[in-house]
């Protein structure tokens, strides 16, 4: 099975940048935002804004440990759109929690 080319049918994707940032921080809670931005395919400034949105919305909290931030996700936060409001953010994280490149 081949991986679809995201540019082959336009520039849209199923997940928002907010979801991508949240997923990346779930995988690596002490990641630098610069690295999160690279993995999400967005700018560092956009990543900072998204993290601020997620903190303000109660989906994410951060604690400074030394020179780094440690991020904690609230898995019981509900999706914001009324069509998905009955689902928890933790449900999304569980779907994407495994690393497809991992041998485990």
Image (tube, helix red, strand yellow):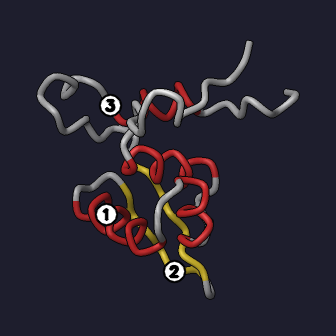
Above or below, 24 relative to 91: below
Q: Residues within 10 Å of mark 2 (few under 14, many from 20)?
A: few
> Is 61 situated above or below 25?
below
Q: Is residue 57 above or below residue 79?
A: below
- Mark 1: few/some/many CA within 10 Å (<14, 14-19, 20+): some
In the image, 40 versus 4, the foreground residue is 4
* Residue at the farthest bottom position: 67
Q: Nearer the viewer, residue 33 or 13?
A: 13
Q: Earlier in the sequence, mark 1 or mark 3?
A: 1
Q: Residue at x 40, y 30 (%)?
A: 14
Tell me the residue at 42%/66% (across/down).
47
Residue at the outermost top position = 1
Image quarter of residue 4: top right
The residue beneath circle 3 is: 88
Please identify the quadrant where the N terminus is shown. top right
Name the element at disc 2: strand
Mark identifier at residue 64: 2
Q: Secondary structure at mark 1?
A: helix
Check disc 1 and report the residue beneath it. 55
The spot of residue 83 in percent (x, y) is 16, 22
Which one is nearer the viewer's eye here, 1 or 24?
1
């Amino acid at each position: 099975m081949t991986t679809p080319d995201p540019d082959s049918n336009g520039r849209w994707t199923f997940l928002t940048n907010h979801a991508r940032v949240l997923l990346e921080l779930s995988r690596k809670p002490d990641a630098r935002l610069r690295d999160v931005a690279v993995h999400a395919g967005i700018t560092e400034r956009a990543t900072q804004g998204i993290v601020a949105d997620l903190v303000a919305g109660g989906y994410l909290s951060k604690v400074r440990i030394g020179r780094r931030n440690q991020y904690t996700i609230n898995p019981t936060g509900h999706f914001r759109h009324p069509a998905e409001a009955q689902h928890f953010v933790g449900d999304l994280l569980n779907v994407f929690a495994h690393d497809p490149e991992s041998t485990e």
